[in-house]
Amino acid sequence: MRDLSTTVKASKRFIHKSKKIIKEDYKIVKNYISSVAHGHMNRVSTSWAMGAHNLHKWRLLAFSWVVFSALLVIYDAFASGVEVTVIYMTNWGLYVALAAFYMLLQCSARKLNNDEISRDYAKLAEKVFALAWCLEFVVLIIFWTAVFPSLDNAPDMGIKVMRISTHAIVQMLLGVELAINHIKFRGSSLKTAVFVFLVYGLWNFS
C-alpha cells in the first residue's frame, strides 16, 4: 500500500509539472504569435519618421493624388477618344497603387482609433504595396526610356499633367511611403509581382 501511495503521489506531481510546462509553452507560443501579428500591424500602421496623425495625413494626401491621377487617365481616354483599357501597364500599376494607398490609409486610421488590425489584412496590405512598387518602378523605367522619346508633344495641359503624374509623381509617392514605413519586401511579394507581369504579358501579347 505504501508503494502504491508513493506511486500515486509521484504521478500527481508529474501531472502537475506537466500541466505547468504545457501552460508555460502555451504562453510562449501565444506571445510569439502575437508578436508576429503585431509586427505586421506595426509595419503597415506606423512610421519611424512621423507620428500616427501625420502618417495618416500623409497617406490621405497620397491616396487623394492617386485618385486624381486615375481621373486624369479617364480624362485622357475621353479626350483621345480611346477606351480606358488594361493594355497599358501604367493603368495596372496605377490601380494597384490606388488599392495599396487605400489599404495603408485604412491601417493608419484604425491605429488612430485604436481599432484592431487583423493580421491577414496587414499582410495583404504589405503584399499589395510591394506589388504596386514593383509595377510602378517598371512603368517608370520603361516610360521614360522607351515610350516618352517617341511621343509627340501633348497639346492638352491635362494630358501633360497626366503623363507626369502617372509616370513620375505616383512613383515618387510610393518611394516616400517605402522610405518612411516599416514594410519589408518578402519573397512571396516578389513572386506575386512576377506572376502579375506574366499575366500582363499573356493578356496583351498572346
Image: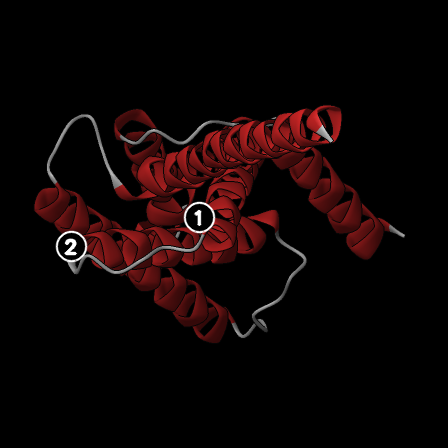
Is residue 86 shown to the viewer in this render? Answer: yes
Disc sitting over residue 112 in the figure: 2
Task: Report the front residue among 182 and 10.
Answer: 10
Judge from the rendering whether residue 105 lies leftward or rightward of residue 53; answer left or right.
Answer: right
Q: Residue at x 90, y 52 (%)?
A: 206
Dot 1 falls on a residue whose secondary structure is: helix
Percent coordinates x, y for residue 72 in the rendering: 36, 64
Which residue matches tag 1? 122
Q: Residues within 10 Å of mark 2 (few under 14, many from 20)?
A: some
**Residue type pointed to by label 2:** Leu
The residue lying at 16 percent from left, 27 percent from top is 49
Question: Residue 43 appears in which quarter of the rendering?
Answer: top left
Q: Position of residue 135 (x, y in %)?
A: 56, 39
Compared with 81, 24 (above or below) is above
- Report the coloring of the rendering: secondary structure
Spatial CA span between label 2 and label 1: 15 Å
